[in-house]
Amino acid sequence: MTEGTPEHAAREVLESLLADLDQRRIDGTQTPLEEALLHLLRFTGFPRAFLTKARRLADLARKLQDGQADAESVRPRLLEGLAKLLADWPEVAGGAQVEPSIPSPPPMPEPSRAGDLESAFPVHDLTRIFLQGQVDRIQEFEVLCLEREKGVREATGRLLGLLHNLKGEYGVLDMRDWNALIHGLESSLQSESVTTDELLQVADLLGRQVSSLASGQSLAVPPEMIRRFLSEDPPGMAPSSPASFKSSPSPPSSTGTPVASPVPPVPAPTPAPAAPGSGSRSGSNGPASGSMAPWLQDPSFLVDFQNESLEHIRSIEIALLRLETTPDAEDALHSAFRAFHTIKGLAAFLKLHGIRKVAHAAESVLDMVRRRELELQSAHVDVLLVATDALRTAVTRIDAGNPSATTGGREHLVSEEAMHRLLHPETIDTRPAESSLPEMESPLGKILVSEGVATVEQVNEALSLQSHGDDRPLGEILVHDLHLKASDVGQALGQQARARQDGGSAMRDPESTFEGLAPVLEKKEGARDPGGAGVASPTGASTVEDSIRVPVDRLDQLIDAIGESVIAQSTVFADPRVASVQDLSLEKKMAQASMMLRHIQELSMSLRMVAIRQTFQKMSRLVRDLSRKQGKLVDLELEGETTELDKTVVENIGDPLVHMVRNSVDHGLEGPEERRSSGKSERGRVVLRAFHKAGSVHVEIEDDGRGLHRDRILAKAVAAGIVKPGQDLSDADVWRLIFHPGLSTAEKVTDISGRGVGMDVVKRNIESLRGSIDIRSVPGRGTCFTIRLPLTLAIIGGMVVRVGRERYIVPTLSVHTSLMPVADQISTVAGRGELLNLRGELLPLVRLHDLFGVSRSSSLQESVVMVVEDSMGRRTGLVVDEILDQQQVVVKTLGAGVDAAAMTGAAIMNDGTVSLILDVAGLVRLAREE
Amino acid sequence: MDATTTVGNATENAVGQRLAGKYLTFRLAAEEYGLEILKVQEIIQLQSITRVPRTPSYVRGVINLRGKVIPVVDLRSKFNIEPTEDTEKTCIIVVQIRTGETLLVTGILIDEVREVLDIQAENIEDAPTFGASVETEFILGMGKVNGQVKILLDIDRVLTDSEASSLRAATIG
C-alpha cells in the first residue's frame, strides 16, 4: 500500500476513527464512521469477504449513530470489528482503485463540485435541486443493492422506496423513458427477477445520466435496457407504445423552458375537453396487492412515511392557499401536485390504500388544472383542503408500533360526497359562498356566450346537469343535450386554448368582462397583502429552498462546541502569562484570532434561527377556515414573515398564536352586517406582524374589530372577586385582567367581552419563552396584542451577583430595579420577615444567603437589593452581596439528574467555571413557602 | 457448563459469568471498588465544582465538562464515609448511565483511580449479606484479584434509584 493513494487515505481515516471510538470521542450522534466504511465499498480489488465485513461494520456504526441500539453493546463490537478489519487489511497489488468495476465509471458530480457545475452551465433550478439529491440517491442505491445481495431484510423495501421516489422525480422532469425504465426495474425487483449486477448496471446508467444532465444533456436509455425492463407492465404514466421509449433527445427542462418558469415543461394545453374518467389518468401504479411484504413490518418505514407525508401536507397547504389567491402560480400548482403524487406513491408502496385513494384523487384534480382542463376555483381549493385534512388525520393516526393494524385500513378517509367531488372536480359548484351573484365559472361557457353561440341559460342548464352528477364535459353536454353545433363548440375550445397560450389567464385582461368578477376582486384584495398568503412576493415565490437538513442535536453540539472554544480562548487570553505579553504583532494576531472566533460563534447562533414564515402561514389556513365557518369576511395580512427567531421560540409560539388569532376572528371581528352598520368595511382585517425592535422580536396580532369592552371585563372581574368594586384601574390594568386565570376560564365572559378563553395559558406559554405580552385596544376600532420575544433562548442577558463566596446569575429581564437600601427603608414584621419600603410600596425581602445556606457576611445596608417581579406582578426584593458584572451568557441545562427548584440552568463563565442561573419565580415561591 | 455441576456451583458461576469482564478499579477510603468499564466515559482531574444549593449533601455540585454541565456526586458522602480533604489523587470518574430513555452523564468523586482489571468469572462471587446494617443493594458482586477483594458497584443503582428521586424531593421540600 503506497502512501498518498486513496486506499491509504481511507485506511488512515479509519485508524483515526478507531482511536476516536476507543477514547469515546464518538458518541451516539456523530459518527463519520459509517461513511468511512461505506467508502471502502467503492474500492475494487479488495476481496469480497473484506468488503462484506466493512459493510457489516457500517451497519453497526449506523446503529450507533441512529441510537437504534444500546451504544454500550454496540461500541465494543464495533471496536473489535474495526481493529480486526484494519489488521486484516488486504494487500492489493498496485493499490486498490476507487472506481467501481462494473461497467465504465460514470464521472459523478461530487457535491463539492456543484458550484463549478453551476457556474459553468446555467443549470435550471429544479434540475439543479434534482441533481444535488441524485448523487446521494445513487450512492444509496448502490449500497442497498449490495445489502440486498447479502440478504439484509429491509434492503429490498428501502430499495423499492428509493426507486419509487426516483421514478417520481424523473416523472416530474418529464423524462418519460427514464421514468419507465425505473418503473420496470421496480416491478422486476418486486417479483425478485433482477440480479444485483443488473441493478448496479442501472445505477451506473443513472449516474451517467446525472452527470450528463449536469452539463445540460439528457441521455437516451440504451435499447437493451428498454428490452430488459420494459417487458414488465408499463407504468400508468408512461406512454404505452414501446416505440416512444426510444425517444430521448428530450432535453432537461434547463434548456427546454424559458427561465421565467421555475418548473419543468408543462404538457401542452389540451384543447379537447377532458375525456371521461381522465381523473384516473396518472393512476394506479402501486405495487400489486398481496400479503404484506416483510419489509413493511419495519416500523421505521412508517415513521419515515409519516414524517415525510406531514411535510408534504404542509407544503400542499401553503401551495393551495397561494393558488387560491394566485391561480396562475404554476410553481405552487406543481409543488402541490408533486406533493400529492409523492404521498400517493409512498402510500401505495406501503399499501395504505385509503391514503393512496385520496391523494390520488387530489392529484388528479391538480393534474387537470395542470393540463388546463379545469380552472381552479376557491371551491376546488376547499375540496382539496378537505382532502389534505383527511390525509393529515390518516397519516397521524398511523401506528408505527403496529403497522399491520394500519396497513389493512381500507376505510374511507373522506365522505363519499367529498370523494365524488374530488373525482369529478368539474362538477363542483364554484360559486363563491359569500356572494349571491350568479356566476358562470366555466370559461368555455363564457366564450360560448360571448361569441353568441350559446345563451346564458343554455350554459347554466349544462352546468346544472354537471352539478347533478353528469360527469361529461361541458362541451359534450352542450352539443348532445342542448343541440349546439359541434363545430362552434370546437371553435370556442380552440379559442380557449389560444387564450391560455397567450400567457395567460384572462384574469390579466381587463377587457375580459366575462371573467368571474369575484376572483378579480379577490386578487385585488390579495394584492394589498405584501407577501401575505404568498402573493407573488419574491421570497414567497419559491417553495423549494436550497438547504441541507441537519439534525437539531448535531447543530446544538456544534453551537456548544463553538461556545466552548470561545471560552477556552478567553481563558488563554486571561492567563497572566499571555496577558503580560507586550508584543504588538502577537497582540494583533491574537485579536485577529479572537475576532474570527466571535464571528464563527455569531454564525453558529444564526444556524438555529428560522423565519417565522411557516408559523404565520399556518394561520392563513386557520383564518380561512374560521371565517368560512362563521360567515365572516376576513383578510389576513402577514407582515415580516422573514423575521427570524430561535427555532424553539418559533415552534412554541405557534400555539399561543393560534389561540389569539382564533380569538381575534371569533370574538374580535364582527360579522359583515354589524361591520356595515358601524360604518366599517365589510371585510374584517387581521394583521399578523413580526419585526425586530430593541434587541427583541415583536409579534403583533392586530384586528379592526370591536375592541375590548372595559366595563364588562371590569364587571366580571369584580364578580369573580379579582378586583374590588370601585377600584380605580387604568385601561392597561383592565386589559391585563383577561390574562387572569379566574377571569379567562369563565366561559361566559368570553361570549360577552370577546376575549379571554385560555388567555392565561397564552400568557404562561409566552412567559415560558421568556417573553411578555401587551394589549392595546380601542373600543369599536380594534385590538392589538404585542408579544415581545427574545431573539434566542440560548443566550440571555444576566447580572452576575455575589452571594457569600458564590456567584449566581439573575436574568436581567426579571430585574425591575436594584438598589442599596438605607436603614429607614427596612422594617421587620413580627421579628421575622423583612420588608423594604420602595417609594411607598412594601416589598418582602428574601435573603439568598438563607435560602442557599450561605453564612451572611454583610449587613443589609451593605447589600444590594434586586427588585424582581413575577408573572402575577408581585414584587419581591432579593438580597445579594453585590452585583459583579452584567453579561450575555449561554444558557445550559443543568445536568440531567440535578433538579433544582430555584435554578433555570447554568452558564459557563469566562474562567471556565459554572454559574447557576436563578429562576426568579421559583425562588420567590420557595421563599414564600418557608 | 457441565450439566452435572451442583446447584450451588451453578448459581455461583452464573453470577460470575454475568459479571465477568473489565472493571475500572478505584479507592474510596480503605476499600477498593470496581466499575464496569463500559459505563465509564472518562476520568478527569478534580476541577472547581460549583455547589448547587438545596441539593442533598452528596451532590458536590456541577462542573463544566467541555461545555456540558454535569453533576458530580461525592461517593464518600453517598456511602456515609467520613469526609476528607481533597488530595491531588482525588479525581472524577465520568460515567454514563441509562435511565429509561435518557442517557445520564454524571461525575463521581473518588479518592484515587487504580487500574483496569479483567476479572474472570470464577473470581466473582455474589454480594455477601451482612444483615440489615450494611446496604448491599449497590453491589453487583465481589471480585477477588490477587487475594484482594474489589467491590463491584452497580453504579446505575447508586446514581439513579434513590438518587434521582431524592434529588428532586430535596429541592422541593
Image: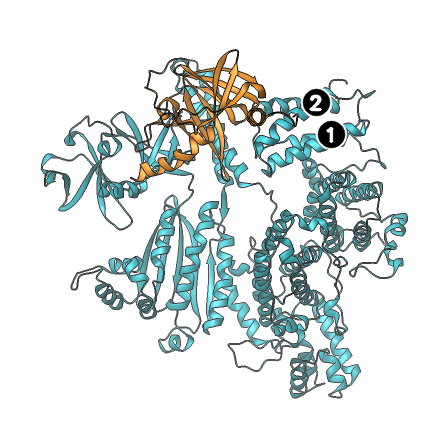
Chain colours: A cyan, B orange
Is residue A712 visible from the viewing direction of this image? Answer: yes
> Tags 1 and 2 in contact by the CB under 8 Å rule?
yes
Residue A875: x and y in percent read 22, 45
Locate residue A229 relative to residue A887 in the image: left or right. Answer: right
Residue A397: x and y in percent read 57, 58
Q: Name above or below for residue A312 compared with residue A18.
A: below
Locate residue A386 relative to residue A601 in the image: left or right. Answer: right
**Is B122 in front, or is B73?**
B122
Which quadrant: the C terminus of chain A? top left
Could you tell me which chain the residue with mark 1 belongs to? Answer: A
Using the image, tell me which numbered label, if any, was put on residue A53: 1
Locate residue A769 relative to residue A240 in the image: left or right. Answer: left
Q: Name above or below for residue A154 compared with residue A560.
A: below
Question: What's under tag 2, amino acid-wise?
Answer: Lys
Callout count: 2
Using the image, tell me which numbered label, if any, was put on residue A570: none
Which quadrant: the N terminus of chain A? top right
Structural distance between the alpha carbons of marks 1 and 2: 10 Å
**Is A741 in front, or is A380?**
A741
**Are marks 1 and 2 in one subunit?**
yes
Residue A288: x and y in percent read 77, 58
Residue A478: quarter of image: bottom right
Name the element at disc 1: helix
Which residue was labeled with disc 2? A84
